[in-house]
Amino acid sequence: MTHSDRTAPSRTFFARQPSPYVATLALIAFLSGCVPIEPSGRSDEPAAARFESPVTSNDRVVARTENFYGDDDAPVSLPFELRDNLVTMPVVVNGKTITGVLDSGSGSILMDRRVSREIALIEQGEAGEALGGGTEAKTLSNITIGDFRFGPVHLEDAPGYAIDLGHLTSSAGFPVDLVVGAPVLEKGAVRVDYRTSTITFAHSGSFDGCAFPIAFELVHNVPVVNIKLGTTQDAAPVDLKVMVDLGSRGGALNLGGPFLRTSTGQAFLAAGKSQKVGHGVGGAVQGTVAQAAELRIGVLVFDDLRTQLTSQIPAFEAGLFDGTLGVPLWNTGTISFDYPARQICIELGTANPS
């Protein structure tokens, strides 16, 4: 896809009301994505991968007929800025341009409370307390955004949540005004190209040239895939469910929850090194860093993968999923999301199928 020199066309959608459960767990899973504060020298290196032949072509996910655009609309590619491994773009909220972060780990729209008050959005009661990475609870307040524009996406009367994102702004080094995932991603196919710093919005099924598509399920509006993890060369691989998270900007694989309480998880923890592993909406995240012998996602295989382990992510502890896959897995190439087709495609810049 190429850049479009024209103004991106927009389609207007009326957003549905997300449940508070989505906001308090799935959304905050993004915010607490394990972001190294004191990383080892390997943390920001692109992950090396190899491919194995797929078992059968029947694994391919067939795209549904839902479309992001009207029938005559062509794909649109727009530039983004990668800041601290986060995909940022201008977002227009009720006529005011602010900095937005696109994140697949967000099931709704989160706006920094300072910004929502500057725009004069009315807080319509509390939606509960959100406890992200770290231990400090934050209050979520319901808001309604009359006019929301992210690239070609135009939402009217979009529900969202106001929350203090100050910890994230401090750790990222730039103002995180707004975080959005599913309301932008769910309308069709969206490709994030880290090599060219472009996002392409297109019909569902537009990226059907993917050699090895990965099926996912939506869990509270965030994409969750099945993986196999070999913690050591000799250990039997374990089956886990992890969220594919554009917001986990420092950790390729982040795990927690019930897995860490299994015998395999306990042994993995014991083999690692304790340190700060991130910074989330609730402050610093403590954990352990260990090396996994092998990670399998479909036919994509990663060897000797740096893995961050923590019990301070509420979404992990609730058992919704076991962890997250993060940006270092794919930031040498592209990642595509097709929510209507329930399909993800990871194309690495340096790896070839074997």
Image: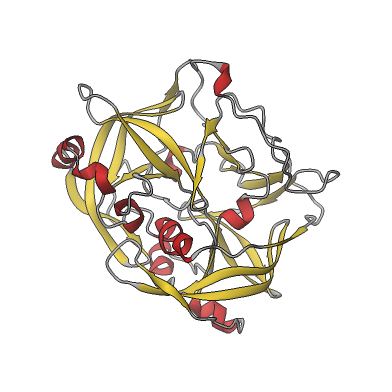
Q: Position of residue 337 (x, y in %)?
A: 59, 42
The residue under the point 31% across, 67% down is: 283
Q: Residue at x 60, y 47 (%)?
A: 197
Q: Quadrant of the N terminus?
A: top right
Residue 84: percent from the left, percent from the top?
A: 45, 55
Depth order, front residue of 226/148: 226
Q: Quadrant of residue 232?
A: top left
Residue 281 seen by the camera: yes
Closer to us: 50 or 149: 149
Image position, residue 225 (x, y; %) = 45, 38
Residues 130 and 320: in front is 320
Instruction: Answer left or right for 266 relative to 47.
Output: left
The answer to which image quadrant residue 150 occupies is bottom right
Q: How many marks?
A: 0
In the displayed structure, does residue 264 sit left or right of residue 346?
A: left
Residue at 56 percent of width and 38 percent of height:
334
Look at 55% across and 25% down and name the residue there. 212
Q: Residue 146's x, y, as percent?
A: 69, 74
Residue 40 in view of the camera? no
The furthest residue to the right: 72
Vertical comparison of 54 with 191: above or below: above
Between 297 and 350, which is closer to the camera in this rendering? Answer: 297
